[in-house]
Image (tube, rainbow, N blue to C red):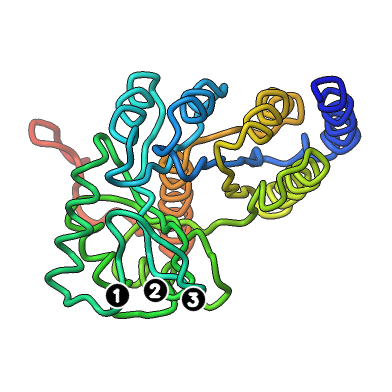
Amino acid sequence: MIRYLLCVMGSVCCFFSVTSHADSLDTVQPRIVIVIDDIGNNLAQGQAALALPGPITYAVLPHSAYGETLARAANSLGKDVMLHAPMSNTKHLKLGPGALTPDMSETRFKEVLNNNLDAIPFAVGLNNHMGSLLTRQRIPMKWVMDVAKSRSLFFLDSRTTRDSVAWEVALSEGVPALRRDVFLDNQQSVASLRQQFIRAVKLSRQHGYAVVIGHPYPVTTEFLEEAIPALDEAGIQLVSAPALLMLQQQTALLAEIERELQSTDPQPLSGCDLSDGHQCE
């Protein structure tokens, strides 16, 4: 398995090397966010995921057996933690503790969500666990954003359905938000992981960034141990989800300032603009 993985990663590095030269001319370095979902149910898998190099972001299941322990461990390593909030899905799959469902009242919904957040120390954001049913519905998504805004959190739409309105509602409610671009390990094979990872690299080059979601499967962790260091060689920066949002906000602010400067004509000085104590001549 290890030998095959190294062979695959050699191919990935090869892909990087032949494409990185042209992109080195770009002024903005491509960035990738990697989020590891479903942290909390398995201690060994969670610890292996935490050991991955770089600013990985970890989405932790509420009230899970090892969620709080792993969230604290991630924070001690300087890694960012999110709540992985269970939400109703169209297949009626079991959600586990802290489930958010469309039959809840607003008061109960927000109570459960706040309890979930309280169960995950150091959470700086949240994303949906499943949610193919709930994320289609604007009213429950507004309740999610009400809580997120009150706690200064960001939201990541895992996009478990094409019909999700979560990202749109987040932006309309003034909540910093991202959307998932690539699921890394829907198929748990090295060949599929490699294909999805290369897809994420291409998207980051095309759009400036890509948001990738994976899980703490042993095959995923083993693959990422080799793949993450290759990003630096490719000229791609691995950043956490909060860091990407901050960079986007800074870029938007600079663009707004630039537009204002371009639209404002410098006005000639009128009268004497010298400070007190000087004479106008």
In the image, 254 versus 53, the foreground residue is: 53
Task: Look at label 2 and name its amino acid.
Answer: Leu
Marks 1 and 2 close (CB-CB < 8 Å): yes
Secondary-structure class at tag 3: loop
Mark positioned earlier in the residue sequence (3 or 1): 3
Residue bearing mark 2: 134
In the image, 225 versus 80, the foreground residue is: 225
Discs 2/3, front: 3
The residue sitting at the left extreme is 277
Task: Look at label 3 and name its amino acid.
Answer: Thr
Mark positioned earlier in the residue sequence (2 or 3): 3
Q: Residue at x 23, y 48 (%)?
A: 117
* Image quadrant in which you'd find residue 76: top left
Residue bearing mark 1: 140
**Could you tell me how many numbered marks the image carries?**
3
Residue bearing mark 3: 90
Q: Position of residue 163 (x, y in %)?
A: 53, 78
Q: Give the CA distance from mark 3 to mark 1.
A: 15 Å
* Image quadrant in which you'd find residue 32: top right
> Looking at the rendering, in which quadrant would you find the N terminus?
top right
Q: Is residue 135 left or right of residue 224?
A: left
Badge 3: residue crowd in 10 Å (few <14, some 14–19, many ≥20): few
Q: Give the CA distance from mark 1 to mark 2.
A: 7 Å
